[in-house]
Image (cartoon, helix red, strand yellow):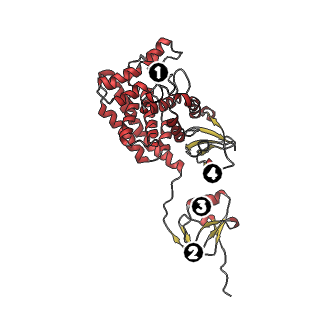
Amino acid sequence: MPEMPQMKKIPIEELKPGMVFTRTVFGDNYEIIAEPNTPITSKDIENLKKKGVKFVETTGELKGVVKIQEEVPLVDRVESSARELMTFYKSLVDSVESVYTNYKVNKEILPEKVVNIVEKVIDKISEVGDKNVFLNLINIVDKTKYLPTHVLNATILGLLLGKEINYPESKLKLLGTGILLMDIGMVFIPMSILERETKLTDEEYNKIKTHTVLGYKAVVQENNMSPEVGRVCLEHHERWDGTGYPRNLQKQQISEYARVAAIVDTYEAMTRKRVYRDRMMSFEAMRAILTEGSTKFDPDILKVFLRMMSVYPVGSYVMLNTRAIAKVISSDPISPFRPVVKVVYDEFGTKIDDGETIKLSEETKIFIVRPVKEEELK
């Protein structure tokens, strides 16, 4: 009888990514780690270490070590891309601020500059290809300049939503231009009103409402831009049930672009700190929008927004049933209540720099207990 090949034990410390063996490599309880002639990955080695496995076994021989292209973990991909985009984002904030300042001083919008900003965002979204990078970006950037950062963030959200709706580039440009200019009429509202720390009087609130009409006049009548862009300025505060302003339009009477703008404008505004109120958590803002959604916003567009953002938006924090606290790093359109999260504090409250990334839709025993306010992390 031919001699049976002997199992050889290989310590985990000796395993290297790319190692290829002539026979199957087994872990504990003969769990298959790598098929014959299939390279071992760094993820295989990491999983073995997490399980406390000390060695693997095989009857084969080491065939060689190959170079393998391993996928960068989602959390690393998101955080790395966000860092690279910080400079890009801040330059756009400055560009938007200059557009608004120039109109206030010279009554000139500079349409080419506005369209150029929108095109840059569209191109960058296509280049990066991962919406979660942008959802993280607008959450982590210091938002000290309220108006330019608000309209830029709303524009980014609007363009991401437009892509989810499958708008062609021509429609994305009109949508983005409209959202970027939707608050241009605000430049003539006195700062004493915009930064009031107490409740506005009816007269002051009515003054703020005029920014929609002023914006339409600035875009269409003074600068000869597209009426479709002007309607976003005029109608982004109209509501599906007719309770908005300035004309109490309802349903399809409202421009489709303005219906998109209404959702992203409301969400972005809710998640921003103002002098008269604290910022809402992303979860709270989503809950508020969903509560009003059936009456205030186009239900079809709202469904797409929910699918894009998830119930627990990217950048928000949640407590898991394990008592660990995690940061949402990616939404799951199939399971909006079960996003992808990264653990940032363990069950004892100890901060973790390189916590586990968990795809909750694949972990039936782990689930979200409640959202966590950022103040609770301090």
User: Number of labelled discs?
Assistant: 4
Badge 1 element: loop
User: Mark 4 is on which residue type?
Assistant: Glu
Label 2–label 1 contact, CB within 8 A: no
- Distance Cα–Cα, label 4 vs label 1: 45 Å
Q: Residue at x 47, y 11 (%)?
A: 203
Q: State which tag comes first along the sequence, 2 or 1.
A: 2
User: Mark 2 is on which residue type?
Assistant: Thr
Badge 3 element: helix
Residue 117 in the image: x percent, y percent?
35, 36
Residue at image mark 3: 44
Choose mark 3 or mark 4, whichever is in front: 4
Choose mark 2 or mark 1, whichever is in front: 1
| Other-residue count near label 4 (Cα within 10 Å), few / some / many at <14 / 14–19 / ≥20 | few
Residue at image mark 2: 22
Q: State which tag comes first along the sequence, 2 or 3.
A: 2
Q: State which tag comes first along the sequence, 3 or 4.
A: 3
- Distance Cα–Cα, label 2 vs label 1: 73 Å
Label 2–label 3 contact, CB within 8 A: no
User: Mark 1 is on which residue type?
Assistant: Asn
| Other-residue count near label 3 (Cα within 10 Å), few / some / many at <14 / 14–19 / ≥20 | some
Q: State which tag comes first along the sequence, 1 or 3.
A: 3
Numbered circle sitting on residue 248:
1
Choose mark 4 or mark 2, whichever is in front: 4
Q: Is residue 314 visible?
A: no
- Distance Cα–Cα, label 1 vs label 3: 60 Å
The quadrant in which residue 337 appears is: top right
Closest to the observer, 155 or 5: 155
Is 179 placed left or right of 293 in the picture?
left
Residue at image mark 4: 362
